[in-house]
Image (cartoon, grey):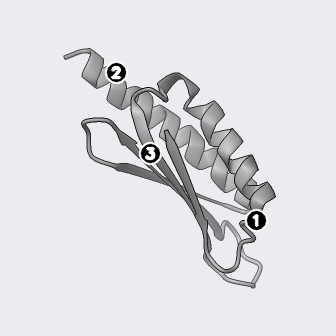
Amino acid sequence: MNIQISTDKNIDGGEKFSTYVNGVVNEAVAGFNTQITRVGVHFTDQNSSKVGFQDKRCVMEYHIAGRSTTAVSHDADSVDEALAGAVEKARHSIEHTLGKIKNR
């Protein structure tokens, strides 16, 4: 499984951040990594340098082999909360999709 991480210019996406995000994503999809071929994680700060309510966004795109790419997003007050919310939504979506495939 390939994990791609990107940030806008307002979020520091250094090596430590990338390692952290990789760990969170790998743990979240550990049971599905044979079916998932790619995960894209994109972070943006909606209000740039201004402080704002729920202005951090994490968009996760994942690709299950043989299916089209699916995206989920979560807005929060911090990057960590945005990642946690997006991961939870992605995990639920993956479970739902793979459950539908299994029931066929």
**N-terminal label among 2 and 3:** 3
Please, what secondary structure does the residue beneath circle 1 have? loop
Judging depth in this view, the residue of 74 and 31 nearest the camera is: 31
Please, what secondary structure does the residue beneath circle 3 have? strand
Q: How far is disc 1 from disc 2 in space, using C-alphas?
A: 36 Å
Reply above or below: 49 against 91: below
- The quadrant of the image that shows the C terminus is top left
User: Disc 3 designates what residue?
Assistant: 38
Where residue 84 sits: x, y (%)? 66, 45
Amino acid bearing label 3: Arg
Amino acid bearing label 2: Gly
Judging depth in this view, the residue of 63 and 94 nearest the camera is: 63
The label number, if any, that marks residue 14 in the structure image: 1
- Which residue is pictured at 54% across the width and 48% down the height? 3
User: Disc 2 designates what residue?
Assistant: 99
Q: Is residue 64 left or right of residue 89?
A: left
Amino acid bearing label 1: Gly
Please, what secondary structure does the residue beneath circle 2 have? helix
Rendering quarter of residue 13: bottom right
Which residue is most to the top?
103
- Which residue is pictured at 53% across the width and 22% down the height? 31
Badge nearest the viewer, 2 or 3: 3
Where residue 60 sits: x, y (%)? 50, 52
Judging depth in this view, the residue of 73 and 65 nearest the camera is: 65
Asked if the residues shown at circle 3 and circle 1 are in contact, with their CB atoms under 8 angstroms apart, the answer is no
- Which residue is pictured at 33% across the width and 31% down the height? 97
